[in-house]
Amino acid sequence: MNTLKTTMLMAGLTALVVVAGNLLGGRSGMVMAFGFALLMNGASYWFSDKVVLMMHRAREVDYGEAPELHAMVERLGTQANLPKPKICILPDDGLNAFATGRDPKHGVVAYTQGILSALPVDELEGVTAHELSHIKHRDILISSIAAVMAGAITMAAHMAQWAMMFGGMGRSDDSEEGGANPLVMLLLIIVAPIAAMVIQYAISRSREYAADAAAAQISGKPLSLAGALRRLESAAEVVPTHTQPATAHLFIVNPLRAGGIASLFSTHPPVAERVARLEAMAH
């Protein structure tokens, strides 16, 4: 079901890219917008993991520096039928972790220094299994594509805004006379970026539920992951993880606090709901 929902949401983002390009520049604008999205997808596929690790000043640790952590990751990776990923540590006192890498052979699990110091072993196993699930199901690739498409839609909206300001709203196709309807352009400027963000965050939410369920199967300890999620959410109120909105969706719990209507744009489902599902699996 989560795979079907993700496919439908990705199709929705693709449709938004096509519609935005068509409204902005006719058929040629549609092709250009779609081509730009594909180009950015390729760049994100090859380089997004390196960029994210650099942004968070992540440092790779070898076996000699953290033998117990390496042994745990290797054991859980074997249970998940995955090659052993690289292990990185973020110089951050917040309690959080994320996975990156374009495919299982290039997987990386990154932990904050705070989570390694605060979590008991069984809960850290649950967190690790969650991140390994993201690697196994290539969720990083899905979220990267979603982020790039959302960015392309936002860029198209900005272009439409400048076109309205300077009167350059004409169609680029000779067969299409006249310019785009100003009301339609205004809708593109206002609605399209919001719709893209909602779809992007919905994809992230659906993948978090799926990763929790897979982690429970990999570790065999759904209650340990549930306990870790509770602990991480409580800690986030006191010692937040330092990050940016562009990478917030990667972390196991949302490092950015949001409430009320802002929760519609949260990259993560409510921790209480995630815990309830894990507890149901345990029973």
Image: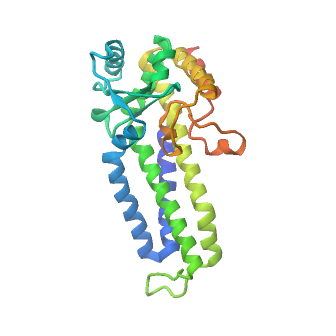
- For residue 232, which quarter of the picture? top right
Horizontal relation, residue 62 to residue 25: left or right:
left
Residue at image x 55%, y 73%?
162
Q: Position of residue 278 (x, y in %)?
A: 56, 21
Residue at image x 49%, y 43%?
4
- In the rendered image, the quadrant that contains the C terminus is top right
**Total numbered labels:** 0
Q: Is residue 95 above or below residue 250?
A: above
Residues 16 and 97: in front is 97
Res 166 visible: yes
Q: Position of residue 202 (x, y in %)?
A: 56, 44
Q: Is residue 175 above or below residue 188?
A: below
What is the basis of the colouring in this image? rainbow
Q: Is residue 95 above or below residue 176?
A: above
Q: Position of residue 265 (x, y in %)?
A: 61, 45
Residues 90 and 251: in front is 90
Horizontal relation, residue 145 to residue 119: left or right:
left
Residue at image x 53%, y 44%?
245
Q: Position of residue 82 (x, y in %)?
A: 31, 26
- For residue 73, which quarter of the picture? top left
Res 1 visible: no
